[in-house]
Image (tube, rainbow, N blue to C red):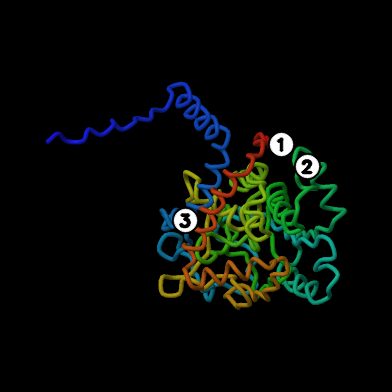
Amino acid sequence: MMGIISAPARVYRTHPILFSCSIALLVFGLLCARHLLHDAWTLAALPFLWFRHADRFMISAEADGFDLSFANYSEHQVSAAPFADRVPPVFHHISLGSGAASHSKWMDVRQDCLDMHPGWEAFLWTDDMADSFVAKQFPELKHMWDTYRYPIQKIDALRYMVLYHYGGIVLDMDLQCKRALGPLRRFEFVSTEAHPAGFSIGFMMASKRNAFVGKLVRNLPRYNRNWLGLPYPAVMFSTGCHYASTIHAFQHNRSELKILAGPKDNFKLHSLNGPVSTPIFNHLGSSSWHSYDAAMIVTIGKFGGGKTVLLLVGAVGVTFFVIRRTKRRREPVMLKA
């Protein structure tokens, strides 16, 4: 009995020209989006890279001979003596728009810090002062600064600019000084740790023309994107704590970029997360710029952990912006000498 002979299966082959064109388009797309992909990757990688070589930049009793509790320092110590003062005696507070300068409570809080540092130069940056300063000292950034979508982005960017130009100490208006900050002036750059990774830009102190702070200014155009189309990621990734901490994490030598945390058994001793009292500050925790999406992201973080939410936001950011039309990359800005 003869078997039934079946028809041979058809073999579908991709036309060589079509295949080559597809590969070429893919490569072209990746080339066009390479800067976006790189920047998104750096932001997503922060929680995994932040603690690399942490023993070199975390202030400690062992490495720096520094008392993290501040108990052994006078409340009125305005100098780092016997060490050299690397941070100049200058205070910067920023109040743009109908901000803290219009509220007596925050002005009183600011005055508490000034009273503890008699004779220091003090700036209260308002709209007119800020506009004039940016136009004069950073004219190449003025258009970007004027067109920021959210007011807090202008405040954040201004922090880096004034700290780079003048040096000194930048403080949020809701940070009440409990003691003078002189012991920390021995370091080139200091900020407090943030949870779950990075540092807080609500308090920064630095030497004048500090190289790292210069990089924070110089990279602002590169990260100026409407990340995820949501207010909180857009701010945090373009000008906020996550942005600044990412630049910190990718420095080759972080030993001079000091972060003030606590000992291993109380690592959050100096954390400024929410209304808290630390050895040097009362943080009254206004967080007035937080939008609707901040609560959502914080809730995800509570259930999934801090690294989970940062990774999730970073991954979604990459996907979202690869699908969207890639913005033209801005060229790096050269700082004035």
Question: Counting other residues with Cα less than 10 Å from the Cα at mark 2, is it few (<14), some (14-19), or many (20 or more)?
Answer: some
Work out whether 146 lies above or below 290: above
Sequence-first disc among 2 and 1: 2
**What's the amino acid at mark 2?**
Gln
**Mark 2 or mark 3, whichever is nearer to me:** 3
**Mark 3 or mark 1, whichever is nearer to me:** 3
**What's the amino acid at mark 1?**
Lys
How far apart marks 2 and 3 lie (CA) works out to: 32 Å
Disc 1 target residue:
336
Residue in front for this viewpoint, 323 or 41: 323
Q: Which mark is residue 13?
A: none
Sequence-first disc among 2 and 3: 3
Residue in front for this viewpoint, 170 or 334: 334
Q: Position of residue 87 (x, y in %)?
A: 64, 55
Judge left or right: residue 180 versus residue 2: right
Residue in front for this viewpoint, 127 or 111: 127
Disc 2 target residue:
137
Q: Which mark is residue 50?
A: 3
Work out whether 213 lies above or below 110: above
What is the secondary structure assignment of the residue under circle 3?
Answer: loop
Q: Quadrant of residue 135?
A: top right
Residue in front for this viewpoint, 198 or 314: 314
Q: Residue furthest left?
A: 1
